[in-house]
Image (tube, rainbow, N blue to C red):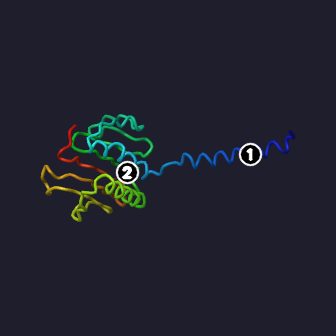
Amino acid sequence: MKKKILLPVILCGFCLGLGGASLLWPKQTRPERIAQLFEDICIKRAKGIAVSPAAFGVAEYALSYTNWIDPLSKTFLDVDNESCSITTFFPEALSFDDAMILRDLITQQKAKHFPELQFDPNAQMGSLSVGWFLGEWGSKQRWGIHLFAYPDRGEDARSSLTIRNPPSFDA
């Protein structure tokens, strides 16, 4: 085969391969990755399903305030018998747009996994905040999901997505 024909054929095949790969294995956005970790780790744990964060590419990171770190989403994951939280801090805090996208994704997950949770208009904290709970405020029976973000606080910018496990949770 002539070189004049072979080179364009190879280049076209390479471009088609890249295009096909991006359709088969699209890259997750940061809010999508956080929502996926929340569903795969936090929600499963809240349902009593034992999962290890390490199975999802999260690295153990033993600090006094967290157990794990996800290098892909640049988040910290704190898991214990009572709750599971995914947190961001400056300079890797969520932007307002990313926090809004995450809010929409978590709203869908809440409806899918815990439709019994009720929106709490008093769960306000941060520039963006949403929470769904059951149980009286301050009681041990209170459980649910809370997302808040402070993207507009400069070096104090942060976000947190937390599920407090149901009272029937069995570690």
Residue 82 shown left or right of residue 61 in the figure: left
Q: What element carries label 2?
A: loop
Instruction: Give how far apart the Cα atoms at labels 2 and 1 are.
Output: 42 Å
Q: Is mark 1 on a helix, strand or loop?
A: helix
Tag in front: 2 or 1? 1
Residue furthest bottom as drawn: 121
Q: Where is residue 92 in the image (x, y as percent from the top left)?
A: 41, 50
Which kind of residue does numbered mark 1 sit on? Answer: Leu
Q: Where is residue 20 in the image (x, y as percent from the top left)?
A: 62, 48
For the residue pair 68 and 154, the one nearer the viewer reads as 68
Residue furthest right as drawn: 2
Q: Residue at x 12, y 52 (%)?
A: 139
Q: In which quarter of the image is the N terminus?
A: top right
Decide: few, some or many residues near mark 2? Use Cα within 10 Å; few <14, some 14-19, many ≥20.
some
Q: In which quarter of the image is the C terminus?
A: top left
Name the residue beneath numbered marker 1. Answer: 11
The label shown at residue 90 is: 2
Q: Where is residue 28 in the image (x, y as percent from the top left)?
A: 48, 49
Decide: few, some or many residues near mark 1? Use Cα within 10 Å; few <14, some 14-19, many ≥20.
few
Which tag, 2 or 1, sits closer to the chain's start?
A: 1
Q: In this view, does 154 lie above or below 82?
A: below
The label shown at residue 153 is: none
Q: Which residue is drawn at 25% across and 58% down?
A: 132
The picture quadrant where one finds residue 129 is bottom left
Q: Residue at x 39, y 56 (%)?
A: 105
Q: Is residue 43 above or below residue 130?
A: above
Task: Kindly indicate whether the residue at mark 1 contacts the one at mark 2 (C-beta within 8 angstroms).
Answer: no
Residue 170 shown left or right of residue 130 in the figure: left
The picture quadrant where one finds residue 10 is top right
Which kind of residue does numbered mark 2 sit on? Answer: Phe
